Image: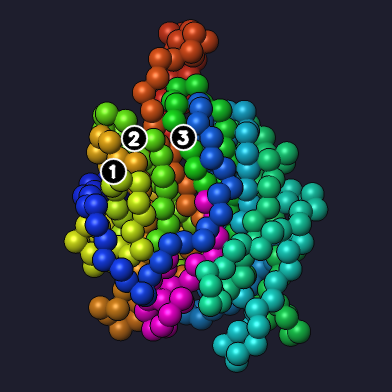
């Protein structure tokens, strides 16, 4: 599966105008630790695309994930919406699935105030992850309602593991924030601003980012449904309430970060963000672009940020490096 890794250069400012159309994300923190960490993440769409039309939604799926070290934490996410959503009915979903044959009870992803388009769940699956390249299966996904016609956007697995070749702070946040350029208020045209705070250092570094989205259709049904990621770095630790079209923020040049890359309707998107020396905040906002006829609609459900730090390697790490046993681990992820 093709992934994108993009290098971004950020700007900073210390004062922000208030924007009533945006605010700070209410994503919750699933993992926040400093140490020798790495992570792997993959996704799979569960909705079919047949003869230029949306097809049936599968209740199960299997994806490959290569965890190149001892597993420390694992999350599974799944997302969809009820078949009568567009008729004004409330959302419905089943939080109970199986993961590699094990019963799992999902926790609802926290929705942005005002209600979102779609229901999502997350579950801790740390005990079911294994080192090496493995397949992981979800079964029992259901957003059907009475007539068994729900849309199952997809699922994703994120595995965190020990990596003695690198040291830093790894933060994982997840929630459910929907955006569509044709909607007003909390459902669009942009998501809320998701911020990460961390201790400043006196040297430049690169933050490595992985985002998970549900519902992105571009590249499958429509020829040109655009979206943009905006980002910001600053030195005062304050997360702005809006990034879109602001002078202090940077617009990622890729017009199609959501392109149904993992299958219809799921996206896992990677990029790097430059953190200047003394940075203490990193923030993101995702926009459904209104410059073309139909901006992308999506739910933003997870973001991981690895922020490296310079440290003297532990003695055991130096031995491994000297013997060449972990040469392959010097790269954070395998980009395919």
- Evaluate whether residue 221 shows in this view: no
Q: Which residue is mark 1?
A: 235
Q: Are marks 2 and 1 in contact (CB under 8 Å)?
A: yes
Discs 3/1, front: 1
Query: Please, what secondary structure does the residue beneath circle 1 have?
Result: loop
Q: How many marks?
A: 3
Query: Please, what secondary structure does the residue beneath circle 2 have?
Result: loop
Q: Earlier in the sequence, mark 3 or mark 1?
A: 3
Q: Position of residue 53 (x, y in %)?
A: 51, 81
Which residue lies at the image location 49% right of the left edge and 43% below the top edge?
Answer: 171
Q: Position of residue 168 (x, y in %)?
A: 44, 30
Q: How is the image coloured?
A: rainbow
Residue at mark 2 to residue at mark 1: CA–CA distance: 8 Å
Q: Which residue is mark 2?
A: 200
Which residue lies at the image location 56% right of the left edge and 76% below the top edge?
Answer: 115
**Mark 2 burial class by Cα count in 10 Å: few <14, some 14-19, many 20+:** some
Query: Please, what secondary structure does the residue beneath circle 3 have?
Result: strand
In this rendering, is residue 166 above or below 49? Answer: above
């Amino acid at each position: 599966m093709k992934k994108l890794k993009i290098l971004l250069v950020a700007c900073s400012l210390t004062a922000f105008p208030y924007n009533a159309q945006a605010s700070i994300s209410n994503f919750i923190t699933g993992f926040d630790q400093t140490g020798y960490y790495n992570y792997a993440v993959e996704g799979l769409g569960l909705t079919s695309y047949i003869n230029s039309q949306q097809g049936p939604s599968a209740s199960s799926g299997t994806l490959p994930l290569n965890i190149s070290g001892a597993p420390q934490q694992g999350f599974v996410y799944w997302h969809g919406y009820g078949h009568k959503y567009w008729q004004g009915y409330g959302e419905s979903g089943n939080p109970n699935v199986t993961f590699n044959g094990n019963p799992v009870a999902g926790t609802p992803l926290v929705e942005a105030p005002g209600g979102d388009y779609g229901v999502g769940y997350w579950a801790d699956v740390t005990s079911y992850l294994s080192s090496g390249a493995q397949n992981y299966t979800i079964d029992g996904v259901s957003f059907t309602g009475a007539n068994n016609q729900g849309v199952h956007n997809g699922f994703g697995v994120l595995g965190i593991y020990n990596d003695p070749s690198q040291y830093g702070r790894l933060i994982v946040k997840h929630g459910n924030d929907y955006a569509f350029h044709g909607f007003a208020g909390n459902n669009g045209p942009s998501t809320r601003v998701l911020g990460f705070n961390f201790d400043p250092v006196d040297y430049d570094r690169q933050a490595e980012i992985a985002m998970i989205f549900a519902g992105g259709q571009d590249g499958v049904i429509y020829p040109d449904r655009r979206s943009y990621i905006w980002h910001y770095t600053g030195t005062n630790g304050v997360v702005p309430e809006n990034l879109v079209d602001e002078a202090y923020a940077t617009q990622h040049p890729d017009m199609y970060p959501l392109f149904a890359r993992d299958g219809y309707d799921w996206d896992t998107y990677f990029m790097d963000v430059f953190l200047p020396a003394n940075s203490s905040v990193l923030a993101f906002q995702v926009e459904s672009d209104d410059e073309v006829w139909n901006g992308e609609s999506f739910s933003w459900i997870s973001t991981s940020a690895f922020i490296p730090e310079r440290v003297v390697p532990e003695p055991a790490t130096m031995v491994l490096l000297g013997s060449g046993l972990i040469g392959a681990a010097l790269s954070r992820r395998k980009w395919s």
